[in-house]
Image: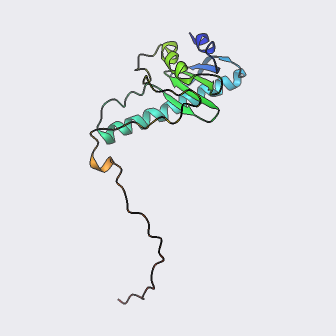
């Protein structure tokens, strides 16, 4: 299943790791030691995402944050994405990240929900709008604050006790 991901345009490397972070195997254009480092990075990042999802669940009191279905880090030229214990690196100019995200859960054998459909992450697709949180408490909603004053403060007088 891992090699099917490599057949997709733009996929540079794929690594698989155990729940404890140990490297199982990897394929692609990276040397084996870099594939192992990618697996260790993905394991550590997965744990961070799980902690953040737990916090979001606790603070927002909204269901659906846990367990996280995976994670994506998208840069100008490359994207790293992971589902379960499988991680892959995609060249944004050469591949379609949306296509990879559709194939990744299947290759990982994940039972977690798939990434949302209808959101294109292909190169040049523009910004993805942020999710809308409905039913959040007023303390979690972003309030507009008054613009800072551009005038200089007036003279100050010394305080007397």
Q: Nearer the viewer, residue 14 or 132?
A: 132
How many discs mark residues in the rendered view? 0
- Residue 20 visible to the viewer: no
Q: Residue at x 38, y 39 (%)?
A: 55
Q: Nearer the viewer, residue 11 or 127?
A: 127
- Residue 34 visible to the viewer: yes
Q: Tell me: residue 41, above or below residue 111.
A: below
Q: Residue at x 46, y 34 (%)?
A: 49
Expressed as whole percent of the image width and height from the top left, the position of residue 17 reads: 56, 20
Expressed as whole percent of the image width and height from the top left, the position of residue 30 reads: 71, 22
Of the 4 image quadrants, the one containing the C terminus is: bottom left
Which scheme is used to colour this image of the protein? rainbow
Q: Is residue 98 left or right of residue 76?
A: left
Q: Residue at x 55, y 33 (%)?
A: 73
Expressed as whole percent of the image width and height from the top left, the position of residue 23 reads: 61, 21
Of the 4 image quadrants, the one containing the N terminus is: top right
Q: Is residue 143 left or right of residue 32?
A: left
User: Where on the picture, by quarter, is residue 144?
Assistant: bottom left
Expressed as whole percent of the image width and height from the top left, the position of residue 102 reads: 49, 18
User: Where on the picture, by quarter, is residue 7?
Assistant: top right
Q: Nearer the viewer, residue 44 or 152?
A: 152
User: Where on the picture, by quarter, is residue 42?
Assistant: top right
Q: Is residue 154 left or right of residue 99?
A: left
């Amino acid at each position: 299943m891992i090699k099917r991901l490599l057949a997709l345009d733009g996929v540079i490397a794929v690594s698989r790791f155990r729940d404890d972070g140990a490297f199982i195997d990897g394929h692609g254009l990276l040397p084996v030691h870099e594939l192992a480092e990618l697996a260790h990075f993905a394991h550590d990042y997965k744990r961070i995402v799980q902690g953040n999802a737990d916090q979001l669940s606790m603070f927002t009191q909204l269901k659906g944050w846990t367990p996280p279905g995976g994670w994506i880090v998208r840069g100008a030229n490359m994207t790293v994405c992971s589902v379960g214990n499988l991680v892959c690196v995609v060249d944004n100019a050469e591949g379609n990240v949306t296509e990879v995200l559709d194939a990744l859960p299947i290759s990982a054998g994940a039972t977690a929900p798939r990434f949302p459909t209808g959101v294109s992450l292909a190169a040049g697709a523009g910004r993805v709008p942020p999710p809308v949180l409905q039913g959040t408490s007023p303390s979690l909603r972003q309030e507009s604050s008054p613009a800072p004053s551009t005038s200089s403060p007036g003279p100050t007088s010394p305080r007397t006790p």
